[in-house]
Amino acid sequence: MKSIAKLTIAAVTIATLAGCSGLNQNKEMFASHAESVNILFLQVPGDTMERANMLVPENAEIKTINSTPSDTSSVLGVLNRIFGIEIVSISGEMKK
């Protein structure tokens, strides 16, 4: 029983550390990203689209948004929401 508890704690720790977000930016372009681990329809550490969008600079024009399937209308989306990784990338140009 103790080994199950240790395994659960280790899995939750790894899942929490797996989510990250970041921004690459220069004078002309930007690219933001966020990753989360999906466990039983919960995103750890949180909503990837919201986190990636918060990193977009104020004076930027979004050109592309890419995301892994996470909807409930496809088999791949449901499987990804049960256990998988969600990645969102937002890129664009800086307004002059």
Image (cartoon, rainbow, N blue to C red):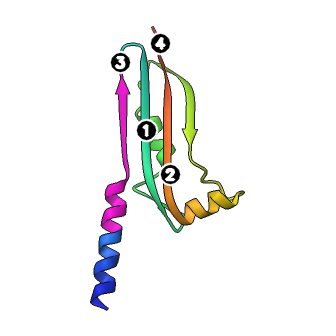
Tag of residue 33: 1
Please tell me whether mark 3 or mark 4 is closer to you in this view: 3
Specify the quadrant of the image occupied by residue 44.
bottom left
Looking at the image, is mark 3 or mark 4 earlier in the sequence?
A: 3
Q: Is residue 9 above or below residue 77?
A: below
Q: Residue furthest right?
A: 73
Find disc 2 in the rendering and name its residue: 86
Residue visible at 36% across and 28% down in the picture: 24
Say if mark 1 contacts mark 2, CB within 8 Å.
no
**Residue at the image point whose x is 50% and y is 42% from the top:** 88
Q: Position of residue 15 (x, y in %)?
A: 37, 62
**Which residue, given by chain and number where applicable, does mark 3 sit on?**
26
The disc labelled 2 sits on which kind of residue? Glu
Residue at x 56% of width, y 43% of height = 67
Amino acid type of disc 1?
Answer: His
Q: Which residues are magenta?
A: 12-25
Tag 3: Cα neighbours inside 10 Å, few (<14), some, or many (≥20)?
A: few
Q: Earlier in the sequence, mark 1 or mark 2?
A: 1
Q: Is residue 75 left or right of residue 17?
A: right
**How many numbered tags mark residues here?**
4
The amino acid at mark 3 is Asn
Secondary element under disc 3, as helix, strand or loop, is loop
Q: Earlier in the sequence, mark 4 or mark 1?
A: 1
Helix, strand or loop under label 1: strand
Q: Which callout, 2 or 4, points at the residue further toward the start of the chain? A: 2
Using the numbered discs, state the Cα–Cα distance from disc 1 to disc 2 in whole angstroms. Answer: 11 Å
